[in-house]
Image (cartoon, rainbow, N blue to C red):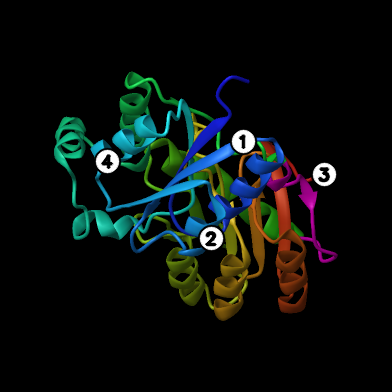
Amino acid sequence: MTNNKIGIIAGGGQFPLLFTKAAKNEGRQVVAVGHQGETGQELEGAVDSFCWVKLGQLGKIISFFKKNDVKETVFLGTITKVRIFKDVRPDLKGLTLWNKIDIKHDDAILKAIANALEDEGIKVLESTIYLRDLLFPKGILTRKRPNSKQIADIKFGWQVAKEIGRLDIGQCIVVRNRSVLAVEAIEGTDAAIRRGGSLGHKNAVVVKIKKPGQDFRFDLPAIGLETIKSMREVQAAVLAVEAGQSLLFDRREVIDQARKAGIVVVGISGSPDNLSLAP
């Protein structure tokens, strides 16, 4: 490999740090851009070269990568979506790109940024290139299994979630008795779980899926300890996640906390009419 550098465009959470460790194990030098107010400070000390940016400073990202001879990059971590209304500070390149995007949905924004990077000779890779083990497994992960009513809710929620995802609204839905309690929008998964779970008066079913046509390079649905915490607060009963298309962080701890809270965790796959829960 003539150029072993790889760039990271980092948001919040542990994904950027996990990727950095995995990339270095593969012999890559890591050049990272962190977003102020989102990315953890510890990333700066973990990578080979680092730069802080504000949301929208696309020109600064491209200049930093070119200065460091970065030809490949990945999008990693979370950006608080509501910040696009108050905290975006675009530079000239970022503002020009922003004005070209007709619909400010996640996929449209991220694809536009990826295209702009690739126009500059910086290829955007899949975020799981070195971390395939983080993909959500198929099957029931807890000892407790879903009952027949919960399986019916999973199937109903899956079908509705796919339609919501197709419209690029969100990746998560909360249901009970085949009624929609909450749909994730810009507020994020945890807020949707709390809102829907509070309406369901216990036993809500949370379904999280990859949007149809989702670009594997960014914005994969992710589950972690905060998800279980939010579900526990409203006494939600089941978490069903699209297997192989979603990320699972802190797997052992997530399953342990779910077990203690009596929450069923299951990885599902297939079509709305033919879902499979078996591993």
The disc, 2 or 3, on the residue closer to the chain's N-terminal end is: 2
Describe the element under mark 1 as helix, strand or loop.
loop
Of residue 250 and residue 68, the one placed in the foreground of this image is 68
Check residue 218 in the rendering and tell me which mark sits there, or answer none: none
Of residue 278 and residue 210, the one placed in the foreground of this image is 210
- Asked whether disc 1 touches disc 2, contact meaning CB atoms under 8 Å apart, the reply is no
Check residue 175 in the rendering and tell me which mark sits there, or answer none: 2
Describe the element under mark 2 as helix, strand or loop.
strand
Report the amino acid beneath label 3.
Answer: Ala
State the CA–CA distance, disc 1 to disc 2.
Answer: 44 Å
Residue found 62% across the figure and 69% down from its top: 228
Report the amino acid beneath label 1.
Answer: Arg
In this rendering, which labeled residue sits more in front, label 2 or label 3? 3
Residue 170 screen position, x and y as percent: 42, 48
Q: Check the picture and name the quadrant holding the C terminus.
A: top right
In this rendering, which labeled residue sits more in front, label 1 or label 2? 1
- Is 144 part of what is drawn in magenta? yes
Report the amino acid beneath label 2.
Answer: Val
Of residue 229 and residue 59, the one placed in the foreground of this image is 59
- Asked whether disc 4 touches disc 2, contact meaning CB atoms under 8 Å apart, the reply is no
State the CA–CA distance, disc 4 to disc 2.
Answer: 43 Å
State the CA–CA distance, disc 3 to disc 1.
Answer: 37 Å
Does 172 sit above or below residue 62?
A: below
Q: Which residue is mark 3?
A: 278
In this rendering, which labeled residue sits more in front, label 3 or label 1? 1
The disc, 3 or 1, on the residue closer to the chain's N-terminal end is: 1
Residue 197 screen position, x and y as percent: 51, 72
Report the amino acid beneath label 4.
Answer: Lys
